[in-house]
């Protein structure tokens, strides 16, 4: 069975942005089949549309699948895991600058609230995936590092807090992210 990797961008993101092209190339060199979908209506994302689109892209999930999310892509992946059938398992998830509840920064107007209309079902998520690595930056202006503690507590995630990486986006000058490559390879063993 081929190892598959799904790279899910965040709010206002796109497949060719930031470190995704670099990671796609590196994972393909390691034999992964890599999918980097353009998520729907990225300017005005809605949970139902994003989760159903991810489900369509994945097809039948399998235990060698790796999911790598950035920002809103992380909660999209977790919400997708909630929809899996009881017997469906995936290999692991890397959550980069992910958040576990609606955002709280100054100027935020609830644009992502559809992803948090219901409580996250952490136990159900863990039934489908039991390997998580959460990567955050100590100076992210949008997603506080406290979310890494939530992922550790709720999912048993290994947490990595990096220094001066902001939101891990191309606007922050991040076009390569070796820690993510290393994390995918670690979880896929």
Image (cartoon, rainbow, N blue to C red):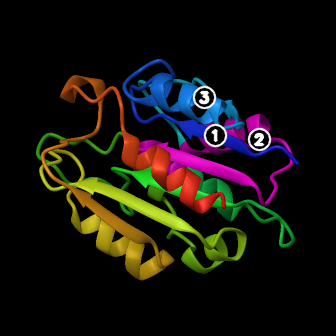
Question: How many residues crowd around disc 1 within 10 Å: few (fewer than 14), some, or many (20 or more)?
Answer: many
Q: How far is the residue under mark 1 from the one under mark 3?
A: 6 Å
Residue at figure coordinates x 52%, y 69% from the top left: 120
Element class at badge 1: strand
- Label 1 or label 2, whichever comes before in sequence order: 1
Q: Residue furthest front?
A: 30
| Residue 81 painted magenta | no
The residue that appears at 82% across and 55% down in the rendered structure is: 62
Mark 1 or 2: in front is: 1
Measure the alpha-carbon separation of dots 1 and 2. 8 Å
| Residue 85 % position (x, y) | 83, 65
Crowding at dot 2, Cα within 10 Å, few <14 / some 14-19 / many 20+, comes out as some
66 or 97: nearer the viewer: 66
Query: Can you tell which quarter of the image residue 162 is in?
Result: bottom left
- Where does the C terminus fall, quadrant-wise? bottom right
The reply to whether dot 1 and dot 3 touch (C-beta < 8 Å) is yes
Relative placement, left or right, of 165 versus 78 is left
Region rendered in magenta:
47-76
In percent of width and height, residue 4 lies at 73, 42
Instruction: Specify few, some or many for label 3: CA neighbours under 10 Å numbering under 14, 14-19, or 20 or more.
Output: some
Label 1, on which residue? 6
Find residue 58 and name its label.
2
Above/below status of 11 relative to 113:
above
Residue 173 is left or right of residue 12, and the answer is left
Which residue in the protein does label 3 denote?
36
The picture places residue 181, in percent across and down from the top left corner, at 48, 44
What is the secondary structure assignment of the residue under circle 3?
A: loop
Picture residue at 45% right of the left edge, 54% below the top: 95
Q: Is residue 39 visible?
A: no
Number of the label disc, if any, that sits on residue 145? none
Tell me which numbered mark, 1 or 3, is placed earlier along the sequence. 1
């Amino acid at each position: 069975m081929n190892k598959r990797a799904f790279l899910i961008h965040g709010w206002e993101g796109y497949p060719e942005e930031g470190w995704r092209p670099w990671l796609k190339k590196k994972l393909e060199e390691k034999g992964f089949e890599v999918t980097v979908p353009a998520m729907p209506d990225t300017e005005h994302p809605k949970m139902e549309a994003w989760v159903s689109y991810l489900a369509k892209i994945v097809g039948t999930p399998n235990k060698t699948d790796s999911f790598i999310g950035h920002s809103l892509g992380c909660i999209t992946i977790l919400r997708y895991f909630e929809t899996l059938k009881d017997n469906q398992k995936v290999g692991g998830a890397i959550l980069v600058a992910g958040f576990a509840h609606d955002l709280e920064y100054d100027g935020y107007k609830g644009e992502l609230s559809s992803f948090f209309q219901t409580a996250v079902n952490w136990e159900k998520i863990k039934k489908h995936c039991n390997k998580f690595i959460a990567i955050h930056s100590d100076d992210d202006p949008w997603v506080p590092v406290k979310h890494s503690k939530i992922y550790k507590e709720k999912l048993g995630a290994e947490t990595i807090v990096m220094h001066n990486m902001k939101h891990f986006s191309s606007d922050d000058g991040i076009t390569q992210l070796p820690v993510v490559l290393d994390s995918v390879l670690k979880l896929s063993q």
